[in-house]
Image (cartoon, grey):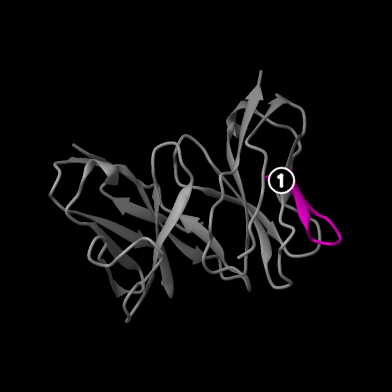
Amino acid sequence: DAKTTQPTSMDCAEGRAANLPCNHSTISGNEYVYWYRQIHSQGPQYIIHGLKNNETNEMASLIITEDRKSSTLILPHATLRDTAVYYCIATTGNQFYFGTGTSLTVIP
Amino acid sequence: SAVISQKPSRDICQRGTSLTIQCQVDSQVTMMFWYRQQPGQSLTLIATANQGSEATYESGFVIDKFPISRPNLTFSTLTVSNMSPEDSSIYLCSAPLGGRRVETQYFGPGTRLLVL
């Protein structure tokens, strides 16, 4: 699985969009980009995933660059409950190897 | 939505003892996975548990320390053997669910283990 690189931490004002970047420059053609988050050491929660096209669901949007070497998770209107560690994972869909993630703090 | 449960949710154990953690999935799955999350750290994959065959362990993890059972398609156990304080972690199981072409991993709530 490709290695991913994320900033260690980010802050975001409540109500604003949170844009979380991820670098996966060694991603292979059959690897998807997955995003998970973990709140207060609960089990990780699935957010979204994509291969080439941008994706959107009720939680977030995923923007993948044309060369697939990086992506951005967008939380359109961050709330205090979005404070969590966000993990970006590049995988074919079987084993998931977690990096260190980005600790997002939403500020009132 | 899919549900994955774990028992116990937490435990405090004495060094040298063993603890078996159970993971139950509400639908049949081919593969289940076990992770460890040490305090302040990210998740580390311990092993893949396949029904009907021995588990496949990641580098740094061995069967003698973390024996795994997978008796059917909805259940698995992870045993943490001969525990030491360094085994104090959150242990999580996961399974690919969803039925889509590319499956999504869902995680249990975790078992918080403290070894004294």
Q: Is residue B9 visible?
A: no
Q: Secondary structure at mark 1?
A: loop
Pick out the residue farthest to the top.
A108
Q: Say left or right for B97 vs B92.
A: right
Q: Identify whether B56 is placed above or below A98.
A: below
Q: Is residue A44 visible?
A: yes
Quadrant placement of the N terminus of chain A? bottom right
Q: Residue at x 74, y 26 (%)?
A: A15
According to the picture, the residue beneath numbered tag 1 turns out to be A60
Q: Residue at x 31, y 75 (%)?
A: B72
**Amino acid type of the residue that numbered disc 1 sits on in the rendered structure:** Ala
Residue B82 lies, in percent from the top left, at: 16, 53
Residue A65 lies, in percent from the top left, at: 83, 56
Q: Residue at x 37, y 47 (%)?
A: B110
Q: Say left or right for B81 vs A45.
A: left
Q: Identify whether A77 is placed above or below B48.
A: above
On whether residue A62 falls in the magenta region, the answer is yes
Q: Which span of residues is magenta-colored?
A: A58-73
Pick out the residue farthest to the bottom.
B52
Q: Say left or right for A11 vs B17.
A: right
Q: Nearer the viewer, residue B99 or B82?
A: B82
Q: Nearer the viewer, residue B17 or A19?
A: B17
Quadrant placement of the C terminus of chain A? top right
